[in-house]
Image: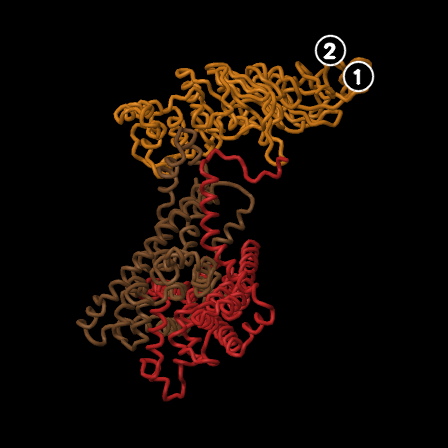
């Protein structure tokens, strides 16, 4: 079931949570809504679920497989919603929680008791919690509760699965395991899914497509590769991973950052405009001599060798702090020590100038 | 430091025992003695007289009236309490605080005034007095008036127990239920009520005890017609004013037994509701 | 304008139903009848109203009602604090039972309390006969009214103060002791200030309850005109004489007093909450 949101706006009192947001999710896709708190991602998810109503507007619409669902209540839309804090029914066992959606169906649409039992057992096997069917939520761990919440949502055979920061409240290790498990689940079930998260690692690992949101707007949508390697704005680049930032300006058609002079092919660059240079730590090299690629002089402040890569902190001649990451082998080859004066070379970078277009 | 050491070991024994005896003496004088007096005087003339007093027709009809009025009041206030708590705890709207303050109103009003207001509205010289007379309906000095006065005095109890609990529990579970396709009544019955059952029972116990024991308000609206509009507390008053002390205390002892049962139920339910609140706090800030 | 909306959107059903039912119930059972009091007394001319609320028996009743309620609340403040202290800090056999019994004045019907207290304190009663040789009469005197009001106000102070004492952080007291404070100083400078807001709240609640009390008092007071008549009794007397307007006038006075007291209680409540938060 495809989802199409058109021109959705939402205000809470004076606070603008969503500003004219439009999004399409294709059938069977797993899309991540990624952004910091307050970006509007959870609000958008709840509007799709029917837990909030969008502000009325002439163009605004929400369509499931082409059908307008803005009038339908949350119960009628056949969405499975997994709450951030699970919202399991505390007075019911795991079994009863999962069976709930089936048991409350109107008499005509309700499956028989044995059919319900069968389905719940299937789901318990799917989430690998068969032995805990008679436990109560307060007797389960966080990860177990999350799986029950998922099974409960899947029990009603939803056309769409909506997850609100499902792994936010869990330990790092549990989170990673559940992430992979969710992806595998999606690969078997192919339910259209929309996942809200503030963890970019999670979005990149799990999703088919990532939608980066910021301050009530969508900044960029694309595959994980697109969003990470070809960010369309500063915000996206900064949000998607650690980044080095340099300030400079456009002069004579080139971008000048202190001693660094770079070609800037973007159209609309105005003379004298301020510019910002974004470089990933692993797109920088450390050399003892000036080389072919543009480089800066810098002094090594600190070397952190404990970790999957070596992390070198330097201070550039322009005064900025710079972080370079490289594999251990490469580091050993170069042989730098704290206090050394070196050259930092650029392999790949993005330049952003003031953007006057909206 | 010797100061700390001696402080840590607690107050010195003589002080402890002195204060304890003083406190127990005060409680003994003001609580235990009156309780003893009720049962003592009730049995003054022996068990035979005790049973006779209780089985006397006017006493029995007083018991019946008490049960009837309390029953109606409790059921009615239960429906109101759940409705009010649902509106207040699960929704945000303007004027919520006004509603909460209004619910506390009977606690600020003297029971005599609680009875007075119904006399002013439904009494012979009241607003509807003539209309009621023309249709031969009696509210004041009849059972309906007693029921109304009882409802007034006891309606906050259930709501006051439910509101803080339901506010703490939030709306997540109910929203989850709706998103899974449940209807409104299903959500109330399957999700909300089981979550509040101990506080609900506690509120019902308090409401029932107060309803059965109410005196001032009911006295004003009742008209004191023997065998017809006397509840148990009023019957006690009637017997006492006729100097039939043993009989008065016999009926009073039934109410005292009810009070003791209420205290026992209260202790038990208080323990249960405390556990529910503790579990809620656990959830909000888990140890692990 | 968005900001002026009455309520936030919610998918939970039954808002208007539950709110409507609650408001209807409240209006029919509480608000409308209460209006009757004000309308009835508003119908009186001012001189008549003044007459009704300041005639000599009425003034005497104010003195008695107010004075006895205040006195009882004070007694309860002192002894209620003592009881709360003993329950919170000491242990003795049967403590759980005693703790439960503190609530008895809440649970016991007022008429039962009334006749029991009269029985005890009348001249032939278990306590009354022991006080008689000392020249102390309790039943049918203002002292009897005081005794009855002490009974019904007892739980308010205890239940206000007890939780505060129970949750008090003993480390603070131990810190004071380690700095050289004597036991009395620890109490007066550390413990008591912490408990004071709760004590004041309990006192105010006991006072408010005592002002309106009827059933426990009218038996032991004897209702002697100008001497032991409480204001609620005068309201009943006026009703029995069909002086509805007079009864309503007195009720207005009582409601005004209750309102002021309720305000004071709420203010005290928020003061004590702020105090606790600052800790």
Residue A259 placement (x, y as % from top left): 78, 19
Q: Nearer the viewer, residue A79 or C235?
A: C235
Crowding near the residue tagged with mark 1, few <14, some 14–19, many ≥20 C-alpha atoms within 10 Å: some
Mark on residue A265? 2
- Disc 2 on helix, strand or loop? loop
Q: Quadrant of the N terminus of chain C?
A: top right
Relative to residue A214, is residue B221 drawn left or right? left
| Alpha carbons under labels 1 and 2: distance apart | 12 Å
Q: In the picture, residue B147 is in which quadrant?
A: bottom left
Q: Nearer the viewer, residue A335 or A253?
A: A253
- Disc 1 on helix, strand or loop? loop
Mark on residue A270? 1
Chain B: colour as depicted = brown
Residue A81 placement (x, y as % from top left): 45, 27
Mark 1 and mark 2 on one chain: yes
Q: Quadrant of the C terminus of chain C?
A: bottom right
User: Could you say which chain is coloured red in the image?
Assistant: C
Chain A: colour as depicted = orange
Q: Nearer the viewer, residue A145 or C215?
A: C215
Q: Is residue B180 above or below residue A30?
A: below
């Amino acid at each position: 079931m495809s989802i199409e949101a058109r021109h959705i706006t939402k205000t809470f009192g004076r606070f603008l949570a969503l500003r004219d947001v439009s999004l399409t999710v294709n059938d069977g896709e797993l899309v991540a809504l990624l952004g910091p708190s307050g970006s509007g991602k959870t609000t958008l998810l709840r509007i799709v679920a029917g837990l909030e109503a969008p502000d009325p507007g002439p163009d605004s619409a929400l369509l499931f497989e082409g059908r307008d669902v803005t009038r339908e209540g949350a119960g009628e839309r056949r969405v499975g919603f997994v709450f951030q804090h699970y919202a399991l029914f505390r007075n019911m066992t795991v079994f009863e929680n999962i069976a709930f959606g089936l048991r409350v169906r109107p008499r005509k649409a309700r499956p028989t008791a044995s059919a319900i039992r069968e389905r719940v057992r299937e789901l318990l096997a799917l989430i690998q919690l068969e032995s805990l069917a008679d436990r109560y939520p307060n007797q389960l761990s966080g990860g177990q509760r999350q799986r029950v919440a998922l099974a409960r949502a899947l029990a009603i055979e939803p056309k769409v699965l909506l997850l609100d920061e499902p792994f936010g409240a869990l330990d790092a290790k549990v989170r990673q395991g559940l992430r992979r498990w969710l992806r595998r689940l999606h690969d078997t079930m192919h339910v259209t899914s929309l996942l809200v998260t503030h963890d970019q690692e999670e979005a990149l690992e799990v999703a088919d497509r990532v939608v980066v949101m910021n301050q009530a707007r969508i900044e960029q949508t694309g595959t994980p590769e697109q969003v990470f390697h070809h960010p369309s704005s500063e915000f996206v680049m900064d949000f998607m991973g650690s980044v080095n930032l340099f300030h400079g300006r456009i002069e004579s058609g080139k971008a000048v950052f202190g001693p660094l002079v770079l070609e800037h092919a973007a159209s609309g660059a105005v003379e004298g405009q301020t510019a910002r240079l974004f470089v990933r730590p692993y797109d920088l090299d450390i050399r003892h001599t000036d080389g072919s690629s543009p480089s800066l002089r810098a002094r090594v402040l600190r070397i952190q060798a404990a970790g999957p890569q070596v992390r070198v902190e330097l201070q550039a001649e322009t005064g900025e702090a710079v972080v370079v990451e490289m594999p251990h082998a490469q580091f050993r080859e170069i042989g730098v020590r704290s206090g050394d004066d070196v050259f930092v070379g650029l392999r790949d970078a993005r330049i952003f100038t003031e953007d006057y277009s909206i | 430091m010797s100061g700390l050491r001696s402080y840590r070991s607690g107050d010195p024994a003589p002080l402890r025992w002195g204060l304890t005896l003083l406190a127990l003496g005060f409680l003994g004088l003001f609580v235990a003695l009156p309780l003893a007096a009720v049962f003592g005087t009730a049995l003054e003339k022996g068990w035979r007289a005790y049973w006779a007093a209780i089985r006397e027709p006017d006493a029995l009809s007083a018991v019946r009236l008490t049960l009837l009025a309390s029953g109606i009041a409790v059921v009615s206030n239960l429906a109101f309490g759940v409705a009010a708590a649902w509106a207040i705890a699960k929704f945000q709207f303007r004027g919520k605080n006004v509603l909460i303050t209004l619910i506390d109103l009977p606690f600020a009003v003297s029971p005599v005034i609680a009875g007075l207001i119904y006399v002013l509205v439904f009494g012979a010289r009241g607003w509807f007095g003539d209309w009621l007379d023309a249709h031969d309906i009696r509210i004041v000095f009849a059972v309906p008036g007693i029921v109304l006065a009882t409802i007034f005095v006891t309606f906050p109890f259930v709501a006051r127990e439910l509101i803080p609990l339901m506010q703490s529990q939030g709306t997540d579970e109910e929203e989850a239920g709706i998103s899974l396709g449940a209807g409104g009544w299903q959500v109330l019955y399957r999700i909300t009520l089981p979550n509040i059952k101990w506080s609900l029972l506690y509120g019902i116990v308090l409401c029932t005890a107060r309803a059965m024991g109410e005196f001032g308000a009911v006295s004003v609206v009742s008209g004191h017609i023997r065998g017809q509009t006397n509840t148990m507390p009023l019957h006690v008053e009637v017997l006492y004013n006729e100097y039939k002390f043993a009989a008065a205390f016999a009926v009073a002892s039934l109410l005292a037994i009810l009070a003791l049962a209420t205290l026992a139920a209260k202790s038990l339910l208080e323990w249960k509701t405390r556990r529910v609140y503790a579990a809620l706090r656990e959830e909000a800030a888990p140890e692990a | 304008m968005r900001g002026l909306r009455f309520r936030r959107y919610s998918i939970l059903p039954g808002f208007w139903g539950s709110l409507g039912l609650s408001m209807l119930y409240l209006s029919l059972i509480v608000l409308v009848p209460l209006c009757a009091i004000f309308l009835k007394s508003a119908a009186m001319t001012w001189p008549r109203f003044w007459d009704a609320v300041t005639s000599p028996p009425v003034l005497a009743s104010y003195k008695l009602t107010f004075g006895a309620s205040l006195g009882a609340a004070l007694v309860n403040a002192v002894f209620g604090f003592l009881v709360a202290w003993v329950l919170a800090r000491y242990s003795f056999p049967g403590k759980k039972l005693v703790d439960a019994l503190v609530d008895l004045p809440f649970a016991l019907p007022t008429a039962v309390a009334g006749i029991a207290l009269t029985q005890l304190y009348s001249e032939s009663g278990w306590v009354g006969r022991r006080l008689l040789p000392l020249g102390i009469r309790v039943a049918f005197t203002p002292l009897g009214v005081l005794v009855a009001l002490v009974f019904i106000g007892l739980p308010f102070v205890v239940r206000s103060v007890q939780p505060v004492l129970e949750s008090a952080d003993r480390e603070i007291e131990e810190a004071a002791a380690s700095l050289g404070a004597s036991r009395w100083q620890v109490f007066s400078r550390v413990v008591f200030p912490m408990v004071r807001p709760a004590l004041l709240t309990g006192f105010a609640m006991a006072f408010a309850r005592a002002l309106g009390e009827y059933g426990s008092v009218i038996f032991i007071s004897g209702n002697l005109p100008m001497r032991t008549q409480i204001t609620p009794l005068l309201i009943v007397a006026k009703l029995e004489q069909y002086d509805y307007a007079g009864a309503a006038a007195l009720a207005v006075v009582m409601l005004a007093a209750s309102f002021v007291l309720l305000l004071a209680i709420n203010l005290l409540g928020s003061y004590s909450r702020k105090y606790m938060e600052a800790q």
